[in-house]
Amino acid sequence: MASVVLDNVKKVYPGGVEAVKGISLNVPNGSFTVLLGPSGCGKSTLLRMIAGLETITSGTCRIADRVVNEVEPAERDIAMVFQNYALYPHMSVYDNMAYGLRNRGTPKPEIERRVREAAKMLAIEDFLERRPRALSGGQRQRVAMGRAIVREPQAFLFDEPLSNLDAKLRVQMRIEIRRLHNRLKATSIFVTHDQVEAMTLADVVVVMNQGRIEQVGKPTEVYNRPATRFVATFIGSPAMNLAPGRVIGRGKVEIPGSGTLDFDPDTFEVAEGTAVEVGIRPEDMTVATPDENTGFVIKPEFVEELGPNRLVHGTAGGEPLVLSVASSMPDLGTRALGLRVPANRVHVFDTTTGRALRRG
Amino acid sequence: MVERRPLATFLAHLVLILGIVVVAFPIWVTFVASTHHAKDIMTAPIPLWPGTQLIENYRTLLFDGLINPIAGGVPLWRMMTNSFIMAMIIALGKIFVSFIAAFAIVYFRFPFRMAVFWIIFMTLMLPVEVRIVPTFKVVADLGLLNSYAGLTIPLIASATATFLFRQFFLTVPDELAEAARIDGAGPVKFMKDILLPLSRTNLAALFVIMFTFGWNQYLWPLLMTTDRQYLTVVMGIQRMINVADTDPQWPLVMAAVILAMLPPVAVVLLMQRWFIKGLVETEK
């Protein structure tokens, strides 16, 4: 196992498209790092550069303290799990797993031992003689992981491995991947556009957008303290509400048409009179009692019923606002509702750069 | 079709049976003619049931040869062997060259890659006959007249097969090549271990087409060979008909036709099992 260190890595395609615009990232030994971002943000390109399937235009990539820019994928000592599994269709499961080891001249008994062990770990022992086409999606994904595990690589690279599975299986495989990681403690880099996968699997989440890193942090960090407007709206479902506002005093921001909100002046540093963008998560607001004056109101328009909770869609200061309430709440009707928003749950962003105006 | 109407079933069968009769009847007549004396089939009515000369006619044809001096006194088994060698070399050669060429075009990035592909593609439009004179000149200058090499090499390059392989390779997911790269398989190993087994179906289909193509060659062998040693079946049949001063030995000609038909049919039957298996096993 080893660390993966990227230093100002860039990828420019012929034709001038810059897919990855200078990324520096340290994936420590044994960590499970998730690259998260919308499609086209460069996360897969980045992973493929680490794997050696794409050339690195500039910058360096180190695996286990060795610069691997010019090293063939097979010699980088990594293993990759692909979205469409990429199993060799004409080989049995056993041969699929053994192929890489045979190519490296691993002795036969050793191959046998490793394949059996991995198969046991992944509960695919019964399928070893079958062809991939005789397996279900989940089983194929296990074989693909088995193929990676038997290599005993320095790092595991996952390229959206769960995207082809149905929702239920995805949850199950997600848990299994996490369990596997806890057991193997292998350095893993996992690419996904699914924030739930990212939040549940990751030790560290790297949020990417347009070829750049927006934020690197623990899942709770990117959720609770988003560094940019992009991260704030990308993570969390439904997305964080954003509304234009103006700071009218220390820790006070006015949202025209809806009232004022308190924010934590020790966290955010912003001068009075500044126009800002205010972010509040739907789940951070609670409905006040009718006689309580909270100074911030929403005009509900319609309600989405989700089962455990209910989404109230409305407007505040002309901007759409979503509020999540427990299903046990009585029907709220369409009268204006007073909302309680804790000061430490209000985020303040710069209107132009989109960065959170955090102190320090 | 999930139709279960008796009338439709009946009509479908009727059409199929008629089709088979139309195709099979001339072959049957040919076969029948090959089992009679020459005089029997030259008089009306033409017999429709096999005669007594089956073994005699085929034996003479296959081994004596002398009976037909114009065909050079070459026994038919010799011509069959020549045809078979020529067809095999052409079919295997075409598949080998095309496979390698398509592999290069699809999996390697080299300068003028697309230009090369388009040049190959353009030659698709040129039949052998168009380039036959320059090709003859080249082969003659190389001293390859009257040799298996001269018979086969000019026919080996194949744009069709290259194009088909290219199209097939493009449908193989890139991830497979990438997975193989990570698994430490170089280009040759990837080709041998993964691409070749996956192409089984295409290989079988192409082999059938190319073998038949090679077997049926007429113009090129005619130009190329003057030595009777290299006479092929197709040329042989033509010579058996073009006899001066006397009637052709029709029963023998018919027997030769029947025999000439057998190897391509055998190849189709043999390969059919392969590529049906391939079709069932491959999943896309």
Image (cartoon, grey):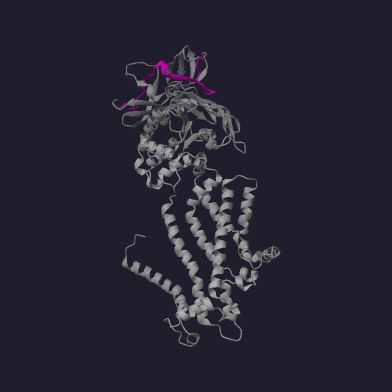
> Would you say residue B214 sits in the magenta stretch?
no
Look at 64% across and 54% down and name the residue there: B119
Residue B197 point in image, percent of width and height? 48, 51
Q: Nearer the viewer, residue A276 or B39?
A: B39
Does residue A238 show up? no
Look at 55% across and 59% down and name the residue there: B92
Q: Which of B236 and B204 is in front in this view?
A: B236
Residue B211 point in image, percent of width and height? 53, 64
Q: Which of A263 and B28 is in front in this view?
A: B28
Look at 65% across and 48% down and name the residue there: B112
Does residue B149 show up? yes
Residue B148 left/right relative to A293: right
Up-down relation of residue B234 to residue A76 (above or below): below
Q: Hey, which quadrant is residue A71 in on the image?
A: top right
Residue B123 left/right relative to A185: right
- Main secondary structure along the magenta-highlighted residues: loop
Residue B273 left/right relative to B6: right
Location of the N terminus of chain B by quadrant is bottom left
Residue A233 point in image, percent of width and height? 46, 27
Count of numbered circles in the view? 0
Up-down relation of residue B53 to residue A9 (above or below): below
Q: Which stretch is magenta?
A: A331-360
> Would you say residue A340 sits in the magenta stretch?
yes
Residue A92 point in image, percent of width and height? 41, 46
